Image (cartoon, rainbow, N blue to C red):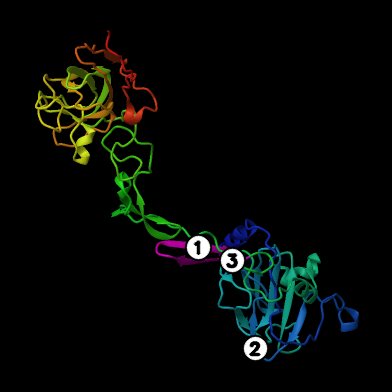
């Protein structure tokens, strides 16, 4: 009988498979051989025996000698019920004289050691219950091998290809779940041993549910992801250098912290950069002089009169500024209030009086404070003033020098908090 359409499809699929080093076994766990392969005149034959005969009782289970695909079920008057299996290495095994036709149709995948039928005594070319096993290079070699001379000795063939302590069939794939959301795979190598497991991995949960990473700043918001097969809360953003944008970009818990920060893509509502200043560099005790500091509005909101204030940093520790003239500032912690509106991109000036209440030189840093009471931190919203005392003798005179620091809107790189306006500390003796 010719192969069916299903047989042809199985053969095509098998031909497209790689030539695995297939692991073989004998069709019975224990056996004797009554008629070897190739025996001719000495066995009373006119042509060589193209198979190997295993005498077994009728009904003894027959096992497939290797993994493969059923390609043909057949019956002829000589061989009786027969089955042909194709193997991934291009060889075919044939099983003849079976008790009844195998229940496995063409196209069925079988595994090495799987029962495929039972020993019988069907056909006229038999001398008693036994299995006639063939190994050949064609699907019909089980009954045409003598014509094409295409069979080989099954005993030697299987002995040469038997795998000791086989764990698996070459080319087989095993997959299993791992961790919460992943799977891993391994394959059977040509030595019948399993390869190592692949990395555990899997798809992210649908919709990537929101979660809290426990990290600071912008890194605190996360999405539930499948990482190496395990569900984890992964931050939606990665830390980046801090910019002036109202976001904790570097995830250190502080927003817009750093010195002379670059403006971000979206500046915060309130942002300022020092551009100019004028203040005395020497003062006599009790002398009052005027100073001013100018900042450019680099935020997105306009500054209203009285909305921003300039405050000395010393008040943060509960002390009064040593540059405050008694009763001349709006309050002990505020040196100056904004007097005019300042739209984004324009410059606002803060004016205030200074004096020295003692004999020591004073260096003081002043910071802009937003309407909500928090100091502005970026891009460069501070100015430092250093004033030296002047020794004045009785009846003498003293001269007040002032210094003006100008910048084209760019603070010196590396200056504390973006800017230091340092006056040369110089003492001047009175003229005599």
Quadrant location of the N terminus in the rendered image: bottom right
Image coordinates of residue 82 in percent, x first then y, are 66, 76
Upstream in sequence: badge 3 or badge 1: 3
Q: Measuring 68% from the left and 59% from the top, which residue is drawn there?
A: 19
Upstream in sequence: badge 3 or badge 2: 2
Q: Is residue 377 magenta?
A: no
Alpha carbon of mark 1 to alpha carbon of mark 2: how far?
Answer: 40 Å
- Say few, some or many: other residues with alpha carbon within 10 Å of mark 1 (under 14 / 14 to 19 / 20 or more): some
Q: Which residue position is annotated with label 1?
A: 184
Give the foreground label among 3 and 2: 3
Q: Measuring 17% from the left and 17% from the top, which residue is drawn there?
A: 290
Indicate left or right for 229 with 115 as reference.
left
Q: Secondary structure at mark 3?
A: loop
Q: Which residue position is annotated with label 2?
A: 60
- Say few, some or many: other residues with alpha carbon within 10 Å of mark 2 (under 14 / 14 to 19 / 20 or more): some
Image coordinates of residue 350 in percent, x first then y, are 17, 21
Is 59 above or below relative to 265?
Answer: below
Of residues 25 and 332, the one drawn nearer to the viewer in this rendering: 332
Could you tell me what secondary structure mostly forms the magenta stretch? strand
Alpha carbon of mark 3 to alpha carbon of mark 1: how far?
Answer: 14 Å
Is 44 above or below relative to 229?
Answer: below
Image coordinates of residue 396 in percent, x first then y, are 22, 11
How many numbered markers are drawn? 3
Q: Secondary structure at mark 2?
A: loop
Q: Which residue position is annotated with label 3?
A: 172
Is 13 above or below relative to 158?
Answer: above
Query: Which image quadrant for residue 325?
Result: top left
* Magenta highlight range: 173-188
């Amino acid at each position: 009988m010719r192969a069916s359409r299903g047989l042809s499809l199985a053969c095509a699929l098998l031909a497209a498979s790689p030539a695995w080093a297939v692991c073989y076994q004998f069709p019975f766990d224990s056996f004797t051989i009554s008629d070897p392969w190739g025996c001719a005149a000495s066995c009373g034959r006119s042509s060589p025996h193209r198979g190997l005969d295993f005498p077994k009782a009728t009904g003894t289970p027959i096992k497939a000698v290797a993994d493969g695909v059923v390609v043909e079920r057949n019956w002829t008057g000589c061989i009786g019920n027969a089955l042909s299996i194709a193997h991934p290495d291009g060889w075919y095994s044939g099983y003849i004289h079976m008790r009844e036709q195998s229940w496995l149709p063409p196209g069925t995948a079988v595994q090495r050691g799987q029962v495929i039928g039972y020993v019988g005594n069907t056909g006229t070319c038999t001398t008693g219950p036994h299995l006639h096993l063939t190994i050949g290079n064609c699907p019909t070699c089980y009954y045409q091998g003598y014509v094409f001379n295409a069979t080989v000795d099954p005993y030697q063939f299987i002995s040469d290809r038997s795998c000791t302590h086989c764990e698996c069939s070459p080319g087989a794939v095993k997959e299993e779940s791992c961790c919460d959301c992943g799977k891993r795979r391994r394959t059977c190598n040509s030595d019948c041993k399993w390869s190592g497991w692949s990395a555990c991995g899997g798809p992210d949960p649908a919709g990537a549910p929101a979660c809290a990473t426990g990290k600071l700043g912008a890194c605190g918001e996360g999405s539930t992801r499948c990482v190496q097969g395990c569900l984890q809360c992964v931050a939606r953003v990665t830390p980046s250098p801090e910019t002036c944008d109202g976001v904790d970009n570097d995830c250190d818990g502080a927003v817009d912290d750093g010195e002379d920060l670059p403006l971000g893509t979206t500046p915060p509502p309130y942002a300022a950069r020092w551009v100019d200043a004028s203040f005395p560099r020497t003062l006599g005790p009790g002398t009052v002089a005027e100073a001013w500091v100018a900042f450019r509005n680099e935020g997105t909101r306009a500054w209203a009169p009285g909305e921003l204030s300039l405050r000395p940093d010393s008040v943060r520790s509960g002390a009064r500024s040593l540059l405050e003239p008694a009763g001349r500032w709006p309050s002990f912690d505020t040196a100056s209030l904004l007097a005019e509106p300042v739209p984004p991109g324009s410059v606002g000036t803060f004016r205030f009086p200074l004096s020295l209440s003692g004999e020591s030189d004073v260096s003081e840093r002043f910071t802009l404070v937003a309407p909500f009471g928090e100091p502005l931190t970026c891009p460069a919203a501070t100015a430092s003033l250093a004033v030296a005392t002047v020794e004045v003798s009785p009846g003498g005179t003293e001269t007040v020098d002032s210094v003006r620091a100008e910048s084209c809107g760019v603070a010196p790189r590396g200056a504390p908090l973006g800017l230091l306006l340092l006056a040369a500390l110089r003492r001047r003796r009175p003229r005599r």
